Amino acid sequence: MNEFLQHIVNMLILGGTYALLGIGLTLIFGIMRVVNFAHGELYTFGAYFVYLVSTVIGVNFFLSLIIAVAFGCILGAAIEFFLLRPMRGADIDTTMLVMIGAMIVMQNTEQFVWGGVAKSVLTPFGESTLALGPVSVSWLRVFVFFSALALIAGSYLLINRTKIGKAMRATFQDRDTASLMGVNIQVIYMATFAIGSSLAAAAGALLGPVYVISPHMGDIASLKAFAIVILGGLGSIGGATIGGFILAFAEEVGAGYISSGYRDAMGFLIIILVLMFKPTGLFARSERIG
Amino acid sequence: MRRLLPLLAVLAFASIPLWLKDPYLLNACVTTGIFIIAAMSLNLLLGYTGQLSLGHVAFFGIGAYVSALTSLGFDIELFGGIRVVHEPWPVWIGFVLAVIIAGICGYLVGKLSFRVRGAYFVIVTISFAEVVRLVALNWVELTQGPLALTSIPPFTLGLPGLGYLDLYGKAANFYLVLAIGVVCYVIISRLTRSRVGRAMVALKENESLAVSVGIDVTRYLILAAVTSAAIAGAAGSLYAHYLRIIDPDVFMFLYTVTMVIMVITGGKGTLAGPIVGGLIFGFIPVVARSFASPESQWILYGALMILIVFVLPQGIVPAIERWFGVVDENEGRAKLEPAK
Amino acid sequence: MKSYTRLVLPVVFAAGFAAQASAQTIKIGVNEPLTGAFAASGTYVVNGAKIAADEINAKGGVLGKKLELVIEDNKSNPTEAAAVAEKLISGDKVPVMMGAWGSSLTLAVMPKLMEYKVPMVVETSSSGKITTTGNPYIFRISPPSSIEEAAFKPMISKLGIKKVDFLVINNDWGRGTADDFTKLFKAEGVQVRSVEMMDQSSQDMNAQLSKIRASDADTLIVTAAVEQLTLVLKQANALGLKKQIVTTGGSQNPDQLIDQAGTAANNSMHLTTFLPWLPDETPNPEATKFFLGEWKKRGFNFAGSTESFRGYDGIRTIAAAIEKAGKAEPAAITEALWQTEIKGLNGPIKFEKWGPSGKESGQSRPNVYLIKIVDGKVTHPKS
């Protein structure tokens, strides 16, 4: 029983971070139809930036989180402007190849700058833990969990309550009509990519200190983010959030009660099952299928 | 002229071992050749039906494992205590089985994943490859998992009664890869020039229109998927018997990426595209190794990839064809032909 | 000139090596992962190798010639590792190599060694298969898990181990350790509760650790590289896991653990093959001090020394073998490696014959130490 309670808490904490990873990708996926392979590298960028600002330069930890997200936003806008804008109208796979190229360049630049040895960020939380009866969790992860929830809620409000969010939703539903109605598609695309990138950077900035930071941390993050997005359905923030928790649940139960060797296979098995029965993902509204 | 070109290319390739004596470069030719075959199979799916499979390495890996296990033998216990013992068989049977089993997997994956299109299809195929990798990693009894299958025998050539020849050498393996590559090229070229191929191109250009004129979309897609997976399996088998060790790293995502790069930069939907793209991206690392530091080799690789896509978004081969004013009947406007 | 040698190469292949011997330098091929997943470790090993080459060259080299390391990146990828071996042997004409860090990388190189009959000193890989498949060109200085297991045997009762759990990385190294140690524990009457795996790239081990926390075992054996070990210690601490933790494999970099896991690293124990914290307790204090001094002088972080010393020892082993062979030719070096005996940083390096008879591989038996982290310091409890 105690073990089960701990698994549930682990799942909630892990699910929150997975959800955060997923929403940035799902926005870009849904609105721009870009399979963003650089997502994991933006995540890594966020993590290294926090390391740079807080540990190397010595700025306050919480402030450096905000700085890292801001720079993630700028980097995202730059990628959109220099790499994606010229590719507008190209096939999904051609754009994807550009993003894979960007991924290779970014990952090896990180390796070049920081070397392969993992970095670790010191936080004000140290190694202190919160123990509630049989359940135990580090304070840092509690902080990360609530920050993730706040960011998810913030993104939800941004999409559903603001003018730019409305324009983004209109673009998602029908780009041409939205354009005719006076929506500046170029601005929407840049905003979408910048927001998606800052969410990825935020995920990296928050999780980097929880884990260790290395040039390859983005690979696994990308893979998980893809799984979450497909579970939730393209372009759905709510879906990605729930998808994140489902993935975390599958992994915890898989590792705790089935076999830890197959832990990472659980998410993919669920994807295959979901797509067999509901090919658009659990929560997608519309996507043409054959 | 167009008919002569492939023949000339084959002759040019066949002459390589005669003048290229550096084993390192010949080795690069063999591995590049294997990946070109895999890229050709991906091109059938991506270039002719427009479906981007990012799990293509799964078929490559399945081919490698099937072929290796057939020729090495195994002894496993399945659920319920059923013991399966397999004695080693000759390598060529492994090759045939690799093609067949990869093809069957292609059928199953096609059945499942052609229910979705676009980005969803991409993700389903990635998921499939990942699941297969994890099975190869964890089913230690069969695959040896991360302990790797070692001492895989090389290909043998010969006829009963005439004696056998183990293909250890690079030149021999080069000709083997070239021969299988030519066969695959002919199969793909026949397929795409046939009515089936035209139907595939039609549904790539406009799926709803193709459906409305009576093309059975899923059937053609699955046919393409099976052929494509079978050829990838053949490439995997070549890889296993050439490298002579395989482990779950054979499912590396980077290998799929390599194939995609070869197809798109070369020109998807053209027969020569994967070959041209493959030659360029197979040899960039070889050339870059001589002058660049390890990280900058990768940065160069990625940057060159972006550059080619930017300058020639259709790929190199279509650009050259436009330059010379040659238009292949297959790459022109799709001609919709109702299936009879 | 270059194209000329290429043309002549097939005809006078053997003569090619003879011509090499009269060249100005003696080349040693180094096949290590410098990019990709294992980049950090590969780079450490290469840095250690460079120190050894510079040290030897400063003393006049070998056979009156300078050593030249030809370093190539195998990109943490088995296909590349095989290609690199091909390039080093046939392109650069190295008579001997060192490599290739990971077991799958080394295994991919091994058929090439058979093909060209060139010896390779294996500095890191731990898979049992490397020395048991019958490759007479393999000379390993790193311990496979069976050597670690044998060294751990007397420590079981001292640590009061009755029941154990395993948490190991899901590769040849982790699985090999779990298998060998399980055998040992069974023979010693220790109960093995569960064997948990973690994927090479996973960062969150809470699920596995929660399960382990619930078991009644008193000791947890962990096998992983330093990044994952850091995470395991931090996450175990956060879960309030109160068991003895013993790590194996010798890639732990305890300093990096102390640095990055902080107080979570306290009281963890580690089986290592090198004691850079206590140079006076190493088998060759003088060499250890020299190596650590050089390492510091070149501005590398101290934590890397537990990985890089293998590169240093590997090159020194090769140099000694070339000296003994009297000529830089593959066959002579292979022969000489069997007679080579040097004082390595982790004990005497001397090759025993392992594997099927007639085509045995060489395996050296390094020392294994159990160290403990107490209050952020590495200690070596005296037996």
Image (cartoon, rainbow, N blue to C red):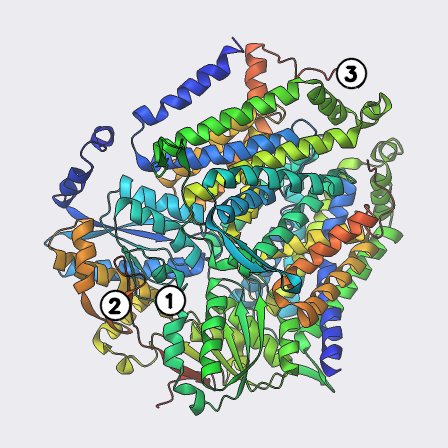
Q: Position of residue B255 (x, y in %)?
A: 54, 43
How far apart are the two marked residues, 2 and 3, measured between alpha carbons?
Answer: 72 Å
Q: Residues within 10 Å of mark 1 (few under 14, many from 20)?
A: many
Residue that carries the numbered disc 3 in the rendered image: B337
Quadrant of the frame with the C terminus of chain B:
top right
Mark 2 falls on what kind of element? strand
Mark 1 falls on what kind of element? helix
Up the image or down, A214 lies above or below C235; here it is above
Can residue C60 be seen? no
Image point 52% across, 89% down: which residue? C162
Q: Residues within 10 Å of mark 3 (few under 14, many from 20)?
A: some
Q: Amino acid at mark 3?
A: Glu
Up the image or down, C259 lies above or below B288; here it is below
Residue that carries the numbered disc 2 in the rendered image: C352
Q: Amino acid at mark 1?
A: Glu
Q: Are marks 3 and 1 on the same chain?
A: no
Instruction: Choose top left, top right, bottom left or bottom right for residue B178.
Output: top left
Image point 44% across, 55% down: which residue? C104
Q: Position of residue C301 (x, y in %)?
A: 39, 67
Can residue C45 be seen? yes
